[in-house]
Image (cartoon, rainbow, N blue to C red):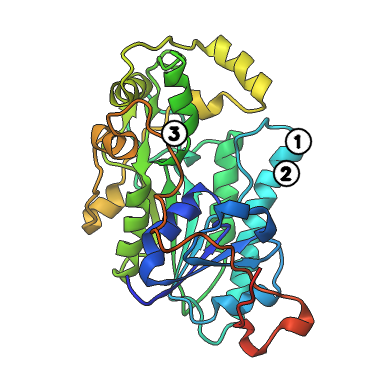
């Protein structure tokens, strides 16, 4: 894609940074974020940051006008304890942002051509017996599944006749940063063995393939609806950790039984489900439609992300070009500063 306008709602995190890396050099990138001032040095050099609250329409809606691609990544992280307050915020941050984007699009003269709403591959049940896909995957009723269902329902009930809509059920995304940092720390300190019994399936996808899939969907207007965004060759937890150790140059790693994970999760404020749920997901629809993964196998993905050097520093982005330093560009949305069309970009 070149010379396109791409809006990333909730795009200041790991996945949004990866998408900005992929699309940013030849496209206009606008990132909707709740806290532009909190980015500091993490601002992406190719992006313009626009403040929104993720819940209601406002001056930010003008930046959706004429967009070629809108990607909604908004939502409170599930890497927390499932207290009632956190559960409520996990639900609300996903459904309210989706609703706000839908209402904003309805008022535009030139709405986005394609809206991709992020979902999660955890919508399928714990599966060690068979893989799940878009055609015969089984959906149950635990908390994380309910979150996914409500999120998709909020998206599907929005009627936008001039905007194509796609849900991507994204698996655990691997790249420089994100979940790889804690995994690499475990390996570094000799704790990189399997978790639980190690038999739980681990569906994953390389962050570049997430971006490539979005680009591919943009160029295939016949594609709409729900797609699994997961590499075609999932592994079990035992193989995942063994591959990571090998790639990072560590032969040995102590395993972590379920009881130890429960204690550790309580201490650091998260849930064991993130490690112990068996996610066995296949990307049947997208591969049948003709999409080819750049990283279909875990070993290839790990080599690209980690390399063979055990001391390699892992970051979210590749270093910017020598003549280009990341600068936070923000937009003044106060009523007195808004020119017609909200297009004036002001310095931080």
The relative height of residue 104 versus residue 256 in the rendered view (above or below) is below
For the view shown, which residue lies furthest in the bottom direction?
340
The relative height of residue 21 versus residue 203 in the rendered view (above or below) is below
Q: Position of residue 128 (x, y in %)?
A: 37, 24
Kind of element beneath mark 1: helix
* Residue that badge 2 annotates: 88
Please tell me how crowded label 1 is: few (under 14), some (14-19), or many (20+) other residues with Cα within 10 Å. Answer: few
Name the image quarter holding residue 339: bottom right
The relative height of residue 89 versus residue 83 in the rendered view (above or below) is below
* Residue that badge 3 annotates: 180
What label sits on residue 84 in the rendered view? Answer: 1
Residue 155 in sight: yes
Residue 176 left/right relative to 110: left
Instruction: Work out whether residue 216 or residue 47 is closer to the camera in this orientation and state it.
Output: 47
Q: Residue at x 31, y 28 (%)?
A: 309
Q: Position of residue 132 (x, y in %)?
A: 36, 38
Residue 34 in sight: no
The mark nearer the N terminus, 1 or 3, is 1
Q: Residue at x 38, y 47 (%)?
A: 207
What is the CA distance from the residue labelled 2 to the residue labelled 1? Answer: 6 Å
Name the image quarter holding residue 264: top right
């Amino acid at each position: 894609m070149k010379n396109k306008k791409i809006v990333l709602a909730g795009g200041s995190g790991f996945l949004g940074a990866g998408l900005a890396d992929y699309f940013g050099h030849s496209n206009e990138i606008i990132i909707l974020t709740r806290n532009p001032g909190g980015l500091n040095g993490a601002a992406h050099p190719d992006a313009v940051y626009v403040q929104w609250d993720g819940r209601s329409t406002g001056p930010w809606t003008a930046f959706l006008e004429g967009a070629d691609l809108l990607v909604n990544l908004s939502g409170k992280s599930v890497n927390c304890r499932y207290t009632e307050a956190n559960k409520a915020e996990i639900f609300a941050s996903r459904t309210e942002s989706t609703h706000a984007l839908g209402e904003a699009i309805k008022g535009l003269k030139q709405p986005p051509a394609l809206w991709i709403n992020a979902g999660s591959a955890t919508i399928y049940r714990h599966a060690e017996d068979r893989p799940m896909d878009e055609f015969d995957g089984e959906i149950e009723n635990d908390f994380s599944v309910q979150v996914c269902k409500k999120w998709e329902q909020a998206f599907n009930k929005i009627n936008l006749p001039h905007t194509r809509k796609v849900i991507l059920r994204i698996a655990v995304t691997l790249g420089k940063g994100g979940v790889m940092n804690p995994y690499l720390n475990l390996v570094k300190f000799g704790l990189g063995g399997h978790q639980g019994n190690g038999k739980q399936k681990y569906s994953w996808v390389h962050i570049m393939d997430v971006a490539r899939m979005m680009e591919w969907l943009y160029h295939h207007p016949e594609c709409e609806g729900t797609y699994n965004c997961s590499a075609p060759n999932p592994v079990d937890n035992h193989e995942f950790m063994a591959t990571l150790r090998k790639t990072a140059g560590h032969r040995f790693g102590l395993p972590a039984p379920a009881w130890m994970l429960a204690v550790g999760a309580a201490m650091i404020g998260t849930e064991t489900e993130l490690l112990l749920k068996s996610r066995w997901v296949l990307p049947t629809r997208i591969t049948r439609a003709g999409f080819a993964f750049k990283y279909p196998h875990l070993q290839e993905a790990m080599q690209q992300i980690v390399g063979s050097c055990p001391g390699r520093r892992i970051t979210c982005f590749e270093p910017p070009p020598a003549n280009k330093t990341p600068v936070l560009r923000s937009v003044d949305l106060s009523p007195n500063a808004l020119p017609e069309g909200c297009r004036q970009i002001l310095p931080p």
